[in-house]
Image (tube, helix red, strand yellow):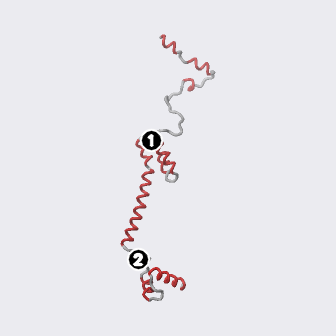
Amino acid sequence: MKIRSQFLKYLYCLICNDSINSEKSVKTYILTPYSVIMTKLDYISLFLIFFSVITIILGIIKIHTYPGKVAKARNHPQEKAIEVTSLLGLIVFPLWMLSLIWAYSGAVIGVMYAKTDDKLPAALSEETDKPPAEANEKDVDPVENQKA
């Protein structure tokens, strides 16, 4: 313990340019160590550092939630999936870019083609034992429609 206190005293004297044997340096070190004293400038600097960090974090979160807001404004059918993907973009940045493109494109992932009719053709909706050639006989010939 004595070696540690002597080392700290020596280190303090080197920093303050005091002589090692000076009584003033020992009293100053014991009563007011330099590392404890904070001035107003130190408090202002500390506040600015914390303010900057908080502002940057909030800005990053706001940017990463943007694709979800776009999807909601455009009434995208996969809005929740876009929101989740954009927040996962905080970890893997290309996911955020993908979710931004996805929100603007209106594409529905998992659907291979756009549905034009909700109904299936009659030949596909009915289960028949007939071969496909006989199933097509139900269709009306377009030439007959023109004669009528």
Cα separation, mark 1 vs mark 2, equals 55 Å
The residue nearer to you, when weighing 44 against 68, is 44
Give the farthest residue toward the top. 147
Amino acid type, callout 1: Tyr
Q: Nearer the viewer, residue 127 or 118?
A: 118
On the question of residue 84 being in view, the answer is: no
Between disc 1 and disc 2, whose residue precedes? 2
Mark 2 surroundings within 10 Å by alpha-carbon count, few (fewer than 14), some (14 through 19), many (20 or more):
few
Q: Which residue is mark 1?
A: 104
Residue 82 lies, in percent from the top left, at 48, 45
Q: Image height check: is 41 above or below 135? A: below
Residue 69's x, y, as percent? 42, 46
State the residue in front, 114 or 48. Answer: 48
Q: What number of labels is visible?
A: 2
* Image position of 7 (left or right of 16): right
What residue is shown at x 39% (from left), y 65% (from top)?
48
To which quarter of the image does residue 3 belong?
bottom right
